């Protein structure tokens, strides 16, 4: 066996043909549903990459302010889409994560509306029940926001933050480059087929 194989490759390629075909059937059903979800979001003006996974409820509220890259996994629909939310490739966003993109000028007699937006870069992980305020407009590549954190400012590349408000704890040593992110929510139909076909 090739020792350079990823965990995902080993798990798929070590299966019997019967088990592979059963897994293919299960994934195909999910693939059809996820394709429908992506279609709805795109029809509403969102920019949606390949193999990304997100809830139907998010697709239904999508608009041109939503952009999701390839192979990202999202388990929430609590996005404030009054301003742009740009999500990169291989991003993981957990359940209950809420992103607020707009606010008001509290020092103005007219309480003017202020629109910010946010960019979440490749390989970031936003863990369960993170709350992101409009004062955070960028989460860098490979950054991690710990579960339950209140993110009030930008998070630099590879930084691990946690707490309320979230503060820097340490730097991540590497990103999850071997992880098939879309497999976390069963959206890996194409990758599953390709991995089996490359079996040696």
Image (cartoon, rainbow, N blue to C red):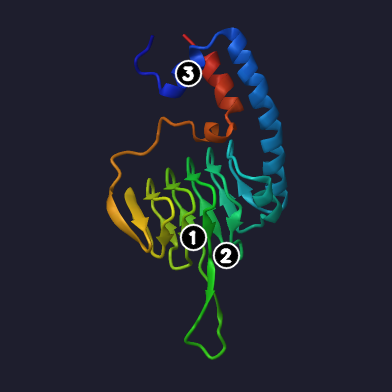
Instruction: Answer with the quarter of the image where residue 151 lies.
Output: bottom left
Kindly check if marks 1 and 2 are in contact, taking CB atoms under 8 A apart as contact.
yes
Q: Residue at x 42, y 22 (%)?
A: 7
Q: Position of residue 43 (x, y in %)?
A: 73, 49
Label of residue 69 in the image: none
- At label 2, counting other C-alpha atoms closer than 10 Å, the crowd grade (few under 14, some 14-19, many 20 or more) is many
Q: Position of residue 144 (x, y in %)?
A: 38, 48
Q: Is residue 123 left or right of residue 72?
A: left
CA distance for labels 1 and 3: 36 Å
Q: Position of residue 96 (x, y in %)?
A: 54, 52
Tell which circle, 1 or 2, labels the residue nearer the N-terminal end. Answer: 2
Instruction: Answer with the quarter of the image where residue 192 lies.
Output: top right
Q: Is residue 115 above or below residue 6?
A: below
Label of residue 118 in the image: 1
Q: Is residue 145 above or below residue 178?
A: below
- At label 3, counting other C-alpha atoms closer than 10 Å, the crowd grade (few under 14, some 14-19, many 20 or more) is few
Q: Quick one: SS at disc 1?
A: strand
- Check disc 3 and report the residue beneath it: 11
* Dot in front, 1 or 3: 3
Tell which circle, 1 or 3, labels the residue nearer the N-terminal end. Answer: 3
Q: Residue at x 38, y 64 (%)?
A: 153
Tell which circle, 2 or 3, labels the residue nearer the N-terminal end. Answer: 3
CA distance for labels 2 and 3: 41 Å
């Amino acid at each position: 066996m090739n020792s350079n194989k990823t965990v995902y490759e080993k798990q798929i390629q070590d299966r019997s043909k019967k088990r592979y075909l059963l897994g293919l059937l299960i994934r195909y059903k999910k693939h059809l549903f996820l394709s429908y979800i992506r279609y709805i979001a795109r029809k509403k003006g969102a920019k949606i990459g390949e193999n990304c996974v997100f809830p139907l409820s998010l697709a239904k509220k999508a608009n041109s302010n939503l952009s999701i890259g390839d192979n990202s996994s999202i388990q929430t629909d609590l996005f404030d889409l009054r301003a742009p939310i740009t999500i990169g490739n291989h991003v993981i966003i957990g359940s209950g994560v809420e992103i607020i993109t707009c606010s008001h000028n509290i020092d103005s007699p007219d309480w003017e509306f202020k629109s910010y937006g946010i960019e979440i870069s490749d390989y970031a992980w936003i863990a369960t029940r993170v709350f992101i305020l409009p004062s955070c407009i960028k989460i860098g590549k490979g950054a991690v926001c710990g579960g339950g954190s209140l993110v009030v400012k930008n998070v630099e590349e590879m930084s691990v933050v946690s707490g309320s408000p979230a503060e820097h704890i340490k730097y991540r040593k590497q990103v999850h480059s071997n992880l098939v992110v879309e497999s976390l929510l069963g959206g890996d139909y194409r990758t599953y087929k390709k991995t089996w076909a490359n079996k040696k």
